[in-house]
Image: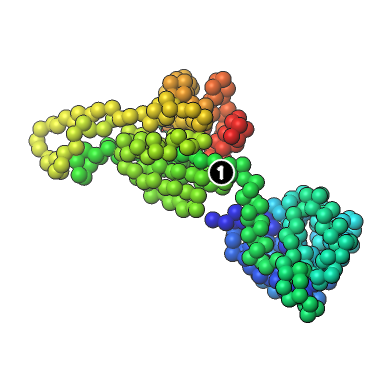
Amino acid sequence: MSLLKNKKVIVGVSGGIAAYKSTFLVRLLIKAGAEVKVILTPGAEEFVTPLTLSTLSKNPVYSTFADEEKTWFNHVDIGLWADFMIIAPVTANTLAKLVSGHADNFLLTSYLSAKCPVYLAPAMDLDMYQHPSTQANLNLLQQRGNQIIPAESGELASGLAGQGRMAEPENIIRFIENDLSSKLPLRNKKILITAGPTYEAIDPVRFIGNHSSGKMGYQLAQRALNLGANVVLVSGPTSQKLDHNHLDLIQVTSATQMLDACQKHFSEADVFIASAAVSDYRPKNIATQKIKKSDTEIQIELVKNPDILFEMGLQKTNQVLIGFALETNNEIENAKKKLQKKNLDFIVLNSLQDQGAGFQKDTNRIQIIDQQNNIDSYPLKSKKEVAEDIFDVLLKKMKL
Ligand code: PMT
């Protein structure tokens, strides 16, 4: 999934022949899942039409301060709406205006109102590009926090060849994705997560299991990936799906298989989160053939399963350990005991007493208890938001 998915992007276009390339840029952004609003300078309208760009961006295009009915467009709102802004192409003239703080068109006023990161992709003839004024303007804008996407070399509209062509739209997208990825807080961190139930075989057709759907664990994995982590997700049987370049999905069935997978990855992990509902017991013997129905009662002897989280707590060196506690009574007391016994940094308590919390649901209600016995209570939220809350606490409390 592209880092551009669901990002709100302003594409500013100023008046140069490279303006035609902004149509490809908008298309690539939309394809990557971004929401795009385009602003044209008056000069840009000479090169590319608002109709083309509004069709591609699926949004109205701004080029004036008001529409035909004299309704004013709010440049402050649009500036604040954006997650980031790209001005591509940015001409020598617009560069100079950005430096001096001119505000005589809608793009310039939006730039001045924007609080988001701004990327500038210059395009002009080679001598204009090399001119000390242009270079000084680029340096100044960079010093002020704008990101410059350098012009590329090649044939120019003047017939000359050299540096001045606007970076190709694919390269602009790559530049921005790399920049966004370098700022993600869990970049280069390895997060090991358990999710879902375990199934403990009784015979070839039956097992001891539980109601865990894996939803909570998969949302945690998705959040970790969104924050830039490399994720190892050790998952019991579930219908949940997740696919990502930075995801290693290990599918297991039983608690012993889950433990084996965790053992392999724990020493290299920075964080371990145990959200799986692991069966505490398994049948001592697994029948090789289906157990036949008879008129008498049968007994199944159970032996204890390993406690995966407890084992990881014993092996803990620098890892941050987060456990879950699923309780039905004496919730806080039981969760605090698990926090200590399993050597955790914090524990996420969810109670089956709470409507909408626990197994299967798309929602959960949690309390987070840390080593100092501080308790943060959260309202009922979607499991996606719960995962965001858990990672917010992780990032705030832990020095990763
Ligand atoms: O999957 P969903 O349908 O979305 O439901 C989510 C959930 C309710 C399963 C999840 O939010 C949750 O509470 N997971 C932990 C369930 C559980 O087994 O809790 P526990 O209190 O029994 O275990 C305490 C902790 O030890 C847990 O982190 C558990 O993963 C871990 N554990 C328990 C037993 C065991 N043998 N090995 C373990 O690692």
In the figure, 166 relative to 290: above or below?
below
* Quadrant in the picture for the N terminus: bottom right
x and y, in percent, of residue 309 in the image:
41, 30
In this rendered view, identify the residue nearer to me: 114 or 21: 21
Say which residue appears at 65% left-offset and 51% top-offset: 180
Q: From the top left corner, tell me how far across and down residue 119 is, in percent.
A: 74, 57
Q: Secondary structure at mark 1?
A: loop
Residue behind mark 1: 188
* Residue 121 pos. (x, y %): 75, 62
Residue at 46% x, 31% y: name it: 324
Q: Residue furthest bottom?
A: 159
Residue at position x 67%, y 62% from top? 172
Q: Which of 159 and 115 lies nearest the eye of the viewer?
A: 159
Residue farthest toward the left in the current orientation of the protein: 295
- Classify 359 as above or below 51: above
Dot 1 alpha-carbon crowd within 10 angstroms: few under 14, some 14 to 19, many 20 or more: few
Q: Quadrant of ligand 1?
A: top left
Q: On the rendered structure, is 296 left or right of 47?
A: left
Q: How many marks?
A: 1
- Of 292 and 186, nearer the camera is 186
- Residue at screen point 20% across, 44% down: 204
